[in-house]
Amino acid sequence: MGTLVPSQMFDHTLVTVKGPGRLTRLDYHAAPKSGEAIAPGMCASIDSNGEMIAGVPAGAAGNRPMAMFAIQDTDAFDANSDVGNISGGVQSAIVATGGFEVESTEFDSGQTFNPNDLLKDDGGANAGRITLAAVAPYGAVPVIGCVSKGVDTNRDGVDVLSFWTCWLPAGT
């Protein structure tokens, strides 16, 4: 009997609204760090071992983790092996270097998002959840996106945040 229990495919999503197609988009593949739970639409990065982790830490001088947005769930059968499944054991993410407008379900629904608001990783216990940056770029936290349309309801009746991906590393 299997051990993975994937979430419903509409509960957590990342939809590319505009940007390069699947064959030409800039994405990254890495094994998820043991114990990490990264849902589609969450911001993520890789640690010093090259494993995908939830959230985007500030890093240190000369080493600033690149922001990415998870495409599939850590426990999805195409990202993690289960009994009788021979998947590659890697998770995929869109790299936040720009060129994408995306819709994500993984944001702080208690905030109001307006066009042009800067976004960051919520950090701590909420690592991976997207929230308002409310700080100047190149400050203490990395900026991972800029709101385009704000919050809307998708075709599955789930609230999504529309934004352009970008990455402005922390400067301090």
Image: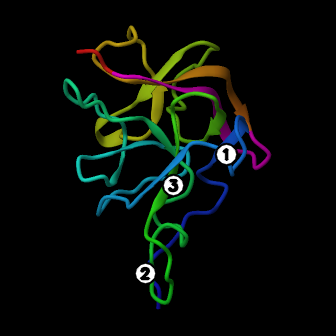
Q: Is residue 136 above or below residue 64?
A: above
Q: Position of residue 1 (x, y in %)?
A: 47, 91
Residue at disc 1, secondary structure: loop
Which image quarter: residue 15?
top right
Give the residue number, with chain letter if any, for mark 1. Answer: 24
Give the residue number, with chain letter if any, for mark 2. Answer: 3
Which image quarter: residue 78?
bottom right
Give the spatial CA distance, label 3 vs label 1: 14 Å
Q: Which of 3 and 14 lies nearest the eye of the viewer?
A: 14
- Disc 1 marks which amino acid? Thr
- Residue drawn at (19%, 27%), measured in percent from left and top? 60
Q: Return the mark for residue 43.
A: none
Give the residue number, with chain letter if any, for mark 3. Answer: 92
Q: Which of 15 and 156 lies nearest the eye of the viewer?
A: 15
Q: Residues within 10 Å of mark 1 (few under 14, many from 20)?
A: few
Residue at disc 3, secondary structure: strand
Q: Residue furthest top?
A: 136
In-image side of 158 versus 169 (left or right):
right
Q: Position of residue 59 (x, y in %)?
A: 24, 30
Judged by its main secondary structure, the magenta piece is strand
Q: Which of 112 and 163 lies nearest the eye of the viewer?
A: 163
Give the spatial CA distance, label 2 vs label 3: 21 Å
Query: Which region shows up in magenta?
Result: 154-169
- Residue drawn at (53%, 41%), measured in percent from left and top? 106
Q: Position of residue 46 (x, y in %)?
A: 34, 46
- Residue drawn at (50%, 73%), measured in percent from left and top? 5
